[in-house]
Image (spheres, helix red, strand yellow):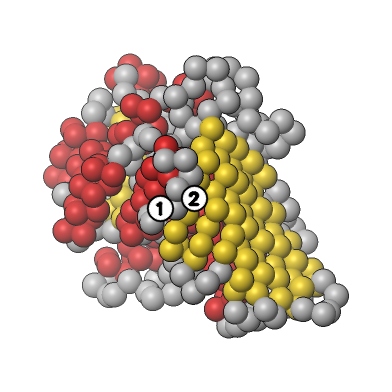
Amino acid sequence: MAEAPIRLGMVGGGGDAFIGGVHRIAARLDGHYTLVAGVLSSTPEKARASAEALGLPRSYDTYEDMARTEADREDGIDAVAIVTPNHVHAAAAIAFLERGIHVICDKPLTSTMEDAERLAEAARASGALFVLTHNYTGYPVIRQARQMIAEGKLGSLRLINVEYVQDWLTGAAEGKQAEWRVDPARSGAGGSIGDIGTHAYNLACFVSGLTLDRLAADLDAFGAGRELDDNAHVMLRWQGGAKGMLWCSQVAPGNENALRLRVYGDRGGLDWSQEEPNSLWFTPFGEPKRLLTRNGAGATEANTATSRVPGGHPEGYLEAFATIYSEAARAIHAQRRGEPVPEDLLYPTIEDGLDGMRFVAACVRSSANDSAWETP
């Protein structure tokens, strides 16, 4: 028997908000969710207009009212997507977690470590799930890369280099999406390091399976009058002896969403670029490079399990995002049945969010102290 759809609410994401649309597509893609309620803007008039445009049955003026009312309804929401600027994440998520409503939250976790700790405490105390949308971990060949490393295909890891490079803040920070990202009150202590650097860091951790030991960071704000970094170079030392580098930038002309991960061990290396997401280069030491593809020859179970169409038909950003939503749905359905959450689910959790926040804080401290080594 098919599972009943999960009733989903949304906080933020109205009007022309990019990430709200992405979350709605991701939630719909595999048919697990029905969006039924939301407070889509901090301005009530805009929230109602956005809800009407989307055909939402129920619109609210505040997330507090939404959490309280939906928890009391027999047909209230099962889960909520938090897609606001960073400074709203904690209070909004806590309002729903305290009422047993599952939370799917955009990254980074919050704008401050204090809020992150409060949110983590609420998530641990709640019977509800907390899922963080580090969506790049949802690509099928990224799942294969993780599996290959875990199986020892690269041997002992030595080097892990990751970068996420954009150019959209090269000029003035204009428009709603830019303005809040360069505002410490709304974004937090990190600029590019919090916005896209956390994605790069999370991806490196996810694929390698390693834990960061120390870092040394050099953060810059090249934009005139900018308080937060728009470029970061970070040296990485991983537990176990591997070393690496992280570069994130939003002021590198000619780059759109150039996320790239390279991992090298004593037996071979892997190379992946998000702008060609269905391809993974694998080079066993001393042998020719091999191109592994999504759902193609040589695809592992981790690859095929998250592929939706035959190899050669491209899947990308939205599908990777949908994989996180679908794994969250499997966990929610399991809870509905009174069963344990399946152990094979790989969606990011509250602990991944805390790890990302500690990483950003350590980068800020290191840069302020002339790139001194810091422990996250």
Q: Do the residues under discs 2 and 1 have CB atoms within 8 angstroms?
A: yes
User: In the rendered image, which quarter contains the C terminus?
Assistant: bottom left
Q: In which quarter of the image is residue 368?
A: top left
The crowd level at tag 1 (other Cα within 10 Å; few <14, some 14-19, many 20+) is some
Q: Is 215 in front, or is 231?
A: 215
The circle on residue 65 is none
x and y percentages locating residue 210 in the rendered image: 48, 69
The x and y percentages for residue 328 are 39, 60
Q: On the rendered structure, is 31 left or right of 290?
A: left
Query: Which tag, 2 or 1, sits closer to the chain's start?
Result: 2
Furthest residue toward right: 288
Neighbor class of circle 2 (other Cα within 10 Å; few <14, some 14-19, many 20+) is many
Instruction: Reply above or below: 42 against 336.
Output: above
Going 68% across and 33% down the picture, which residue do you hit? 252
Residue 76 visible in rendering: no
Q: Measuring 49% from the left and 22% from the top, which residue is drawn there?
A: 226
Residue receiving disc 1? 374
> Residue 97 at x, y = what percent?
21, 50
State whether residue 115 appears in this view: yes
The amino acid at mark 1 is: Glu
Placement of 52 over or under 296, stated as above or below: above
Quadrant of residue 55 within the rendered picture:
top left
Query: Secondary structure under badge 1?
Result: loop
Residue sitting nearer the eye, 206 or 362: 362
Q: Which amino acid lies under the numbered mark 2 shown in the image of this protein?
A: Ala
Q: Is mark 2 on a helix, strand or loop?
A: strand
Please give the label number shown on residue 216. 2
